[in-house]
Image (tube, rainbow, N blue to C red):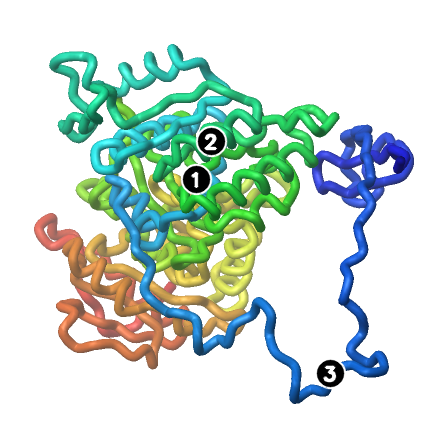
Amino acid sequence: MAKTKTIYVCNECGAEQMQWWGRCPNCNSLQPLQEQTVSPSPTPARPGWQSAARPGAKSPSALHPRASRRFSDIQGDALSRFASGYGELDRVLGGGIVPGSLVLIGGDPGIGKSTLLLQVANQLAAILPRILYVCAEESGQQVKLRAARLGMGTASEPGAESINGRQPPEEPGGEPNLYVMPETDLEEILRELESLKPQVAVIDSIQTLYFASLTSAPGSVAQVRECTSALMQVAKRENITLFIVGHVTKEGTIAGPRVLEHLVDTVLYFEGDRYASHRLLRSVKNRFGATHEIGIFEMVEQGLREVVNPSELFLGNREEIAPGTATVVACEGTRPIVVELQALVAPTSYSSPRRSTTGVDYNRLQQILAVLEKRVGIPLSKLDAYVASAGGLNVAEPAADLGMAIAVVASFRDRLVDPRTVMVGEIGLGGQVRLVSQMELRLKEAAKLGFKRAIVPKGQSLPEDLGLEIVPVGKVIDAIIAAIPVQTAAADEPFRQIGEEEEL
């Protein structure tokens, strides 16, 4: 009989050690290693497997595949997807839900992960025969009360309506198609999946499940890895779509081993300020679609509601224009979003000036300030600089550099930028305005929202029927001259396009 052995596993990175350490020597995590008992099972020898170089082996011409197939023999049919009932979620998933796929959703506590999945399960119950909701963190009564707060009705409650006004269809037994299972035992959940065979199942959450054969506590590296692997095998075998909720650490990453994100097909992050109403559903991995797509929801009294036009959410009050404001068009995946950037430049009260950002990259701001001082001659090294994006959207791409620079200069000179103008371009260290990708999508979104003018990099290939006045610029100084008009005293003419250079 094989002897059991004791190993010590890090809950952060999953590294295994033969002795206990107060901190992980692999990732330097301050959490102590967790003790686990392992029972090694002998691996039986496979008869007939020997080196092909042995005497009497078959020649290369006699070799034939046992389980593999030629790449040309594999059918390349398109994936059959079905809608989730929410267009924003379908966009992030790549066009809809793929049968048999595993989707991992992570986010901060209280951000709305369970609310979103309960609403999706309720929508799918109207079109699919069987939907299973495994609530490992709540009882069935708690889920029922939360559904009642969201306005979700069942067939047993006369007059109740679902979120979209439709009642779920009933089976011959008179029960709705949404099944709830409050359970944390993995074996019971697997038996229910194989017995019920639902089209879609929700696991809320993976960190609370436990496998009785393992001695470690629920949420540990071994438990999360084994539970996810077992769920994946059943989902692929029975063609069940799984939505798995994952907790996040204080750094914002999904808790547990990194192999959790490798096992699933899609990884989604639910982001947003807990004190704001809007939420962002961001895709960071997708085997069936584009990554870095976002879906935008708004938290209302009846739960989460889709935002039809997200650009209006991230545009400030365009009726009251303030100095230091510029508008850019950012791209999240294949979705263009118009965002308003606000800058404030003020004299510093300290020996070293302060730099603060909200929604934009701090290092990009430092680089742009250095370019403006070196290439344009604006003395910013003795001034505080604050830059923020309206609505709290995180704009990290370089295409927002030009708008950030225009906003800083406008705040420094206390000038107004034409609110009907958008700026798109990357700024190089030499003061050049570089080309960016997906320019046509960006300008079409700006034209749809009523913008009249666009400042873009010189040499960018564009179609002619966009309905915008295109101003190509090669240097950041040219963009500043084109973006900041001369202020006039006439109240009915607050902006006047200029052709001559203005002294900065």
Residue 73 at least partly seen: yes
Q: Mark 2 falls on what kind of element?
A: strand
Q: Amino acid at mark 2?
A: Ile
The mark that comes first in sequence, 3 or 1, is: 3
**How much space separates mark 1 and mark 2, taking CA atoms?**
7 Å
Q: Position of residue 198 (x, y in %)?
A: 36, 35
Callout 3 amino acid: Lys
Element at badge 1?
A: strand
**N-term-proximal mark, 1 vs 2:** 2
- Quarter of the image that includes the C terminus: bottom left
Residue 122 in the image: above or below residue 405: above
**What residue appears at the point 33 percent right and 45 percent down from the top-left corner?**
295
Check disc 3 and report the residue beneath it: 58
Identify residue for label 2. Answer: 203
Q: In which quarter of the view is residue 17 placed?
A: top right
Residue to which mark 1 is pinned: 242
Residue 20 relative to residue 152: left or right = right
Q: Nearer the viewer, residue 182 or 54?
A: 54
